[in-house]
Amino acid sequence: MKKMISMLTAVLVTSAPGFGACSDVPPSGMGGAMSVNSGVTGKVVETTTAGDYTYINLEKDGKKAWVACPPMANVKLGQQLGFTGCTPMMDFESKALKRTFDLIMFCGAPLSEAQTELLSKKSTGSSGQVPESKEGIVVEAAKGADAHTIADIYDKIDQLDKQTVSVSGKVMKVTPRIMGRNWLHIQDGTGSAMQKNNDLVVTTNALPGVGDVVTISGTIAKDKDFGSGYKYRVILELGSVKPK
């Protein structure tokens, strides 16, 4: 599977020159991707209009991302643009260009200049979408030599980085089919929202429901940055999920 790359306010690197014509319009359903109420901003470093879309390469903080939006006139190099409500498409094939984009964002019309400035200053993306903690969550800790609570993972992140761990928790949020994975937020009652050590993000091929109590085994990664707002202080990747 291709390396996961990203989406949202900061931006990710995809190398690409132009874009194709109407034959490149994404199929109905966006190839399994889902619409995300998120934003992407950046400086225009390349743009072209073809078929039903204007394609814009945005750069922010040294990273780049391609955006496809309804046709626009007079897009200028160096212009700051922002978009929300975008849908990520992984491995999008442009038949006209005979190339595949690792990721492209299909968006609506751009924001106003004031909205773009506001969006660029906000903390959007993964770090801004932690579900609200529910008082009274108590989940029995996982068992085994590699078992940890969520707060313990945060406390020991330096030594647990790139290590396999098991953790039990209640599924608080599920976001399916983003960048080829399902994204979960789990909480076990340890840590606190104030200290930002009570919620763990997990990527997995499994699809539990919100409210399920599960035990997950996977690899911990520290300071993981997929680009475009997908940046995590701690994340558990490729987790295998079992009912608790």
Image (tube, rainbow, N blue to C red):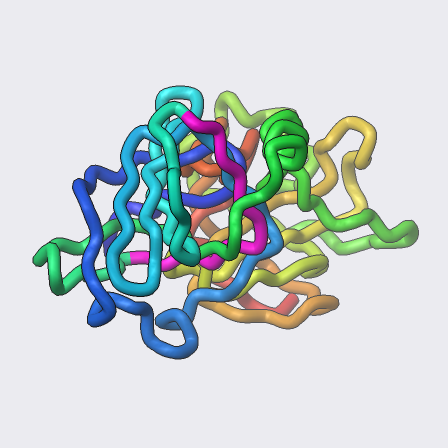
**For the image shown, how many numbered marks are present on the structure?**
0
Q: Quadrant of residue 64?
A: top left
Q: Which residues are magenta?
A: 79-90
Q: Residue at x 65, y 66 (%)?
A: 244
Q: Looking at the picture, tell me which residue is in the foreground, 9 or 17.
A: 17
Q: Residue at x 59, y 29 (%)?
A: 120
The x and y percentages for residue 155 are 65, 25
The answer to which image quadrant residue 14 occupies is top left
Q: Is residue 88 visible?
A: no
Residue 94 vs 18, above or below: the answer is: below
**Residue at point 38% right, 39% down?**
74
Query: On the rendered structure, is 190 left or right of 162?
Result: right
Quadrant into which the N terminus falls? bottom left
Image spot of residue 86 (x, y percent) = 51, 54
Instruction: Check if residue 38 falls in the magenta segment.
Output: no
In the picture shown, does residue 174 fall above or below 77?
A: below
Q: Residue furthest bottom?
A: 28
In the image, is residue 86 part of the stretch drawn in magenta?
Answer: yes
Residue 159 drawn at (x, y percent) = 49, 24
Tell me if 28 is positioned left or right of 185 in this view. left
Magenta span: chief secondary structure: strand
Residue 69 visible in the shown view: yes
Residue 234 position, x and y percent, is 55, 34
Q: Is residue 114 left or right of residue 135?
A: left
> Can you name the residue that lies furthest to the front here?
74
Identify which residue, 194 or 142, lies in the foreground. Answer: 194
Please identify the quarter of the rendering in which residue 23 is found: bottom left
Residue located 50% across and 65% down the image: 34
